[in-house]
Image (cartoon, rainbow, N blue to C red):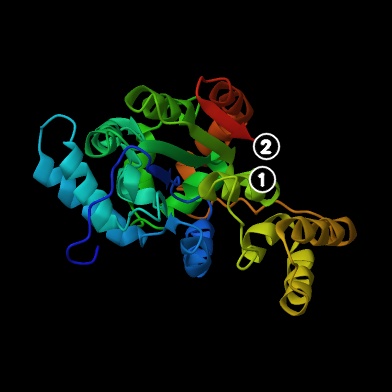
Amino acid sequence: MPHSGSQAPAAGTVDLVLHLGAHATDGGRIAGWLSENAETLSAQGLVLPAPRRFLALISRALAEHGQDGPASPAREAALLAELGIDDARRRLVVSAPGLLGPASQVIAPEGFYIKDVARRVYGLRVLFPRARLRFLLAVRRADGFLPALLSHLPPEAGDTLLPYLDDDVLPWSLLVETLRRHAPAAPLTVWRHEDLPKVWPQVLEALTGADAQVPVSGMTGLAVTGLSAEGRLRASRYLATNPPPDPVALQRVIAAFGARFGFDAAPQTDQAVPGWAQQHVRRLARSYETEWADIASQSGVAALG
């Protein structure tokens, strides 16, 4: 909250950078990195609200705004001030999959990432009509994404929800189309969850901005995910006593451990997927490369990897 008597900031030059998730992708590592480096990034002009607080404020503001048109400059400025934007800090960054709705609504009778998503994205435009929105999103192969998602839901969720999925593709491209259609002026940066070990520097730069000095603290968890089990263990031990001075040096260390101990994608598991659906999930996974090509070709999308 701003100090009493402080002037609410003008909205026109504010950047709102929102990492939407998706659910069951980076395991909270991006939000954790932002939280760990909150003081350093704040000193560079970034505002880093806690995800739960941000979601609560947005939900309350949407409920109060109702069906009105775009927020007035005064109302928008007041909300930005409540979030922590002021004359010195003009870029807000948050990592919150809940912006697209709860995990229980990712798969619904309406389809995959459809229930309430359009209203939420449009609501952000209504609340912040003069701010510059930027979205970041990770997608994930079906045989990794669906078990990870279902593992956070009640045991019967697989039998209830999986029949709602299309037979041929996990429609990430439809989610991307929804984001672009309802926020066409908001650039969208997308990457494959499986590529995070190699694209994390670009992801963090997209979050903080090209001019920021990206702190290396907390990056190890992002960087080691693509290594083999032994490589992760040995690299983590080495980095704990030999912290790299910058992201480039960290990448060199990871490349050296990868060359020696190998790379290994995160294991896929069918544990949370009911037996009747496992072949279905594998069929969805086979369409992933085609789906990614469709996403990368969409206007306004920056595809990493």
Residue 135 in picture, x, y percent from top left: 44, 38
Q: Residue at x 49, y 50 (%)?
A: 147
184 relative to 74 in the view: left or right: right
Residue 170 sits above or below residue 261 on the image: above
Residue 196 seen in the current view: no
Q: Residue furthest bottom?
A: 241
Q: Position of residue 2 (x, y in %)?
A: 25, 63
Reading the image, the residue beneath label 2 is: 305
Q: For residue 126, what is the image quadrant?
A: top left
Circle 2 SS class: loop
Q: Are marks 2 and 1 in contact (CB under 8 Å)?
A: yes
Q: Residue furthest right?
A: 260
Kind of residue sitting beneath label 2: Gly
Q: Does residue 192 appear anywhere in the picture?
A: yes
The residue where tag 1 is placed is 199
Q: Nearer the viewer, residue 234 or 64?
A: 64
